[in-house]
Amino acid sequence: MSLSIRNQLPGTVTSVTSGEVMATVRLRLDGGQDLTAAVTAEAVEDLGLAKGSAVRALVKSTEVSLATGPVEGVSIRNQLPGTVTDVATGGAMARVRLTVAGGELTSAITRDAATELGLTAGSAVVALIKSTEVSLSNA
């Protein structure tokens, strides 16, 4: 199956906390960072997710926000440090590619945001991803 989701990071499940309807799944990405996904309990069962399961974290580029440093005092659990490798701007939007330990991410943000943050190749950034925006697949 082909997907339009370009952000696909491999990792291993480190814990699953199930609730009645939803579950949080913690994983260690191949690059060493921790990532949290909030998925349905049904998805945990269907995918057979358990500690040690190999997975792939999938995130749409529109769900990857960028900051110029770590952000405190927010509910966003996933903050991955990285380096910008490319910025392409259009009339309203920008596509920002970055490397993070163990992989690459693409972020779709407004052109104004990219300009205000001064993003260029080599810029240090932190990718911010809400756990509810992380989907999982079997690796």
Image (cartoon, grey):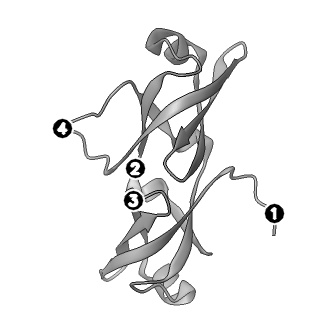
130 displayed left or right of 139:
left
Q: Residue furthest right?
A: 2
Residue at x-position 76% and y-position 59%: 3
Percent position of residue 37, x then y: 42, 64
Distance between the alpha carbons at the discs numbered 4 and 3: 18 Å
What SS does tag 3 mark? strand
> Residue under circle 1?
2
CA separation, marks 2 and 1? 24 Å
Do callouts 2 and 4 mark residues in contact (Cβ within 8 Å)?
no
**Residue tagged 4:** 73
Q: CA distance from mark 4 to mark 1?
A: 37 Å
Q: Do callouts 1 and 3 mark residues in contact (Cβ within 8 Å)? A: no
- What quarter of the picture does the N terminus occupy? bottom right
Q: Is residue 70 left or right of residue 4?
A: left
Image height of 66 relative to 92, above or below: below
- Label 1's element? loop
Marks 2/3: CA–CA distance: 10 Å
The amino acid type, in three-letter code, at marker 1 is Ser
Q: Quadrant of residue 23?
A: bottom left
The mark that comes first in sequence, 4 or 3, is 3
Question: Where in the figure is residue 97, as x and y percent of width and height?
Answer: 62, 33
- Residue at x 18% of width, y 37% of height: 73
The residue at the far left in this view is 73
Residue at 47% x, 84% y is 49
Give whichever of discs 4 and 1 has the lower sequence position.
Answer: 1
Residue 35: mark in rendering: 3
